[in-house]
Amino acid sequence: MSSSFDPSGLHTELFIDGAWQKAASGATFPVENPATNEIIAHVADGGPADAALAIEAAGRAQVQWGKSTPRQRADILRRAFELVIANTDRLAAIMTAEMGKPLAEARGEVAYGAEMLRWFSEEAVRIGGDHTTSVDGNTRIMITKEPVGPCVLVTPWNFPLAMGARKIAPAIAAGCTMVFKPAELTPLTSLALVQIFREAGLPDGVLNVVTTTSASSVVETWTSSGIARKISFTGSTQVGKILLRQAADNVMRSSMELGGNAPFIVLADADIEKAVDGAMKAKMRNMGEACTAANRFFVHRSVVEEFSEKFAKKISELQVGNGAAEGTEVGPLIEQKGLDKVVSLVADAVSKGARILTGGIRPEGPGYFYTPTVLTDVSLDSELMNTEIFGPVAAITPFDSEDEVLRLANDTEWGLVGYVFTESMEKALRFSADLEVGMVGLNTGLVSNPAAPFGGVKQSGLGREGGKIGIEEFLEYKYTAIAI
Ligand code: ADP
């Protein structure tokens, strides 16, 4: 199977109630390849009228879908898993063309997203419940779990396949219907995924997709409909807060995967080779465009020079280019705005005393490229310490004591993930306990795993995706009191 992008056979319409259809207005919007600036497709630009049709379809389908058997839902997810795996090269090529990540990473994302489908196909048949007796012995207490109801799913552009799969899979497993709005920068992967669910036998109306450039009016149509019972959002903290306010009006269940400001801590006793390997993954995966990306490197003063030099050397050897070319290790950023932000954050850090060990260049030519960069002696009042860089820039600051670095690491409103490198079990467990985050990477730069609960504390979000508890986000508990 070819791994070059081929738009033939790809649907670019809205998918509502089991049918592909144009936007009511007839409008479309272009999708750009961030490596070449070429327009690779035009996609239906849905509006509130289309959004209303989609949520009504989800509402109608809920009753029957909620009564489908666990095995039916598991089988659909299992077939979708197999189809995604069989289409790995095609899906990876679409993702690389619309988002920019290197093909090897895109294939890795397909495997991760597919595993979410398989994981939840296995969870669908193990929803269970509980049973107990009241303390006075007069009542049997039966606890059953039911689907929450129609869900609003909103996803970002940085992991176009995995973010959709991570929400759709548990919703299907739990018996919820959905309206889904993928990011406007990367709609094609989601449309291809929907096509796969259809082939896998998902009934009409269960999954409805509206691509749009009017995110706020489409999503507000859904949150204010009175039909949707839950919203699951991945994106910026700023937009998450807007959606939480909307969800409050109808008291909707809410899962929020928001921003991060991950500390990457290298203690004095760390294995530096391991730390550098971990840093490459935690910083460079997805060109640094990940909420889990290491944003602040705190390295003990006794090892900061060795770590920085080795890290900068590895970073400088990375092959930057069009992600579609085999061998490329770093693709372009997603858009001009993201590139401008990275350029300005580096300029700000340098103006406050940071030194550039490697990179710091915006190459000429098409595409939103930025050379992978390592900054050292970064001052704590630099802007990049307090904002998600979302680019291939590592900012290193030395520290002297463990108490000091814990205070610095926790001095942020976010709390998604923290990385710690040490050879001491005692220190590892202390940091694991004291970091104010939802996830900790101990001697590893990668925490995402379908079997693990992904999510953050503080302003990084609410709820968890994946793992044994991932399905709970889509289930309600019902308690029935039975007189004995
Ligand atoms: P990012 O900075 O990663 O693009 P955003 O939070 O802006 O993150 O976008 C994540 C998702 O939220 C995208 O699908 C985007 O279209 C959507 N979105 C952005 N603004 C709004 C809004 N006001 N209401 C609903 N969805 C929105």
Image (cartoon, helix red, strand yellow):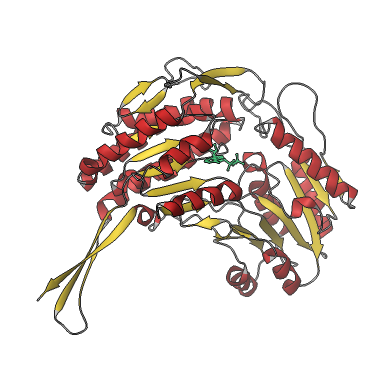
To which quarter of the image does residue 71 belong?
Answer: top left
Please indicate, yes or no, whether residue 468 appears anywhere in the rendered image. yes
Q: Position of residue 113 (x, y in %)?
A: 45, 40
Please indicate, yes or no, whether residue 206 appears anywhere in the rendered image. no
Quadrant of the frame with the C terminus:
bottom left
Task: Report the image quarter containing ligand 1.
Answer: top right
On screen, residue 332 versus residue 50, left or right, reads right
Residue at figure coordinates x 70%, y 69% from the top left: 406
In the image, farthest residue toward the top:
8
- Above or below residue 135? Residue 6 is above
**Residue sitting nearer the eye, 105 or 345:** 345
- Above or below residue 369? Residue 240 is below
**Residue sitting nearer the eye, 476 or 171:** 476
Q: Position of residue 289 (x, y in %)?
A: 64, 41
Residue at figure coordinates x 51%, y 52% from the top left: 245
On screen, residue 153 versus residue 417, left or right, reads left
Q: How many marks?
A: 0
In the image, farthest residue toward the left:
484
- Above or below residue 211? Residue 260 is below
Q: Position of residue 239 (x, y in %)?
A: 57, 46
Residue at figure coordinates x 27%, y 31% from the top left: 204
**Residue sitting nearer the eye, 256 or 393:** 256
**Residue sitting nearer the eye, 297 or 226:** 226
Quadrant of the frame with the N terminus:
top left
To which quarter of the image does residue 68 belong?
Answer: top left
On screen, residue 393 versus residue 126, left or right, reads right
Residue at figure coordinates x 79%, y 44% from the top left: 345
- Above or below residue 33? Residue 373 is below
Q: Position of residue 299 (x, y in %)?
A: 76, 61
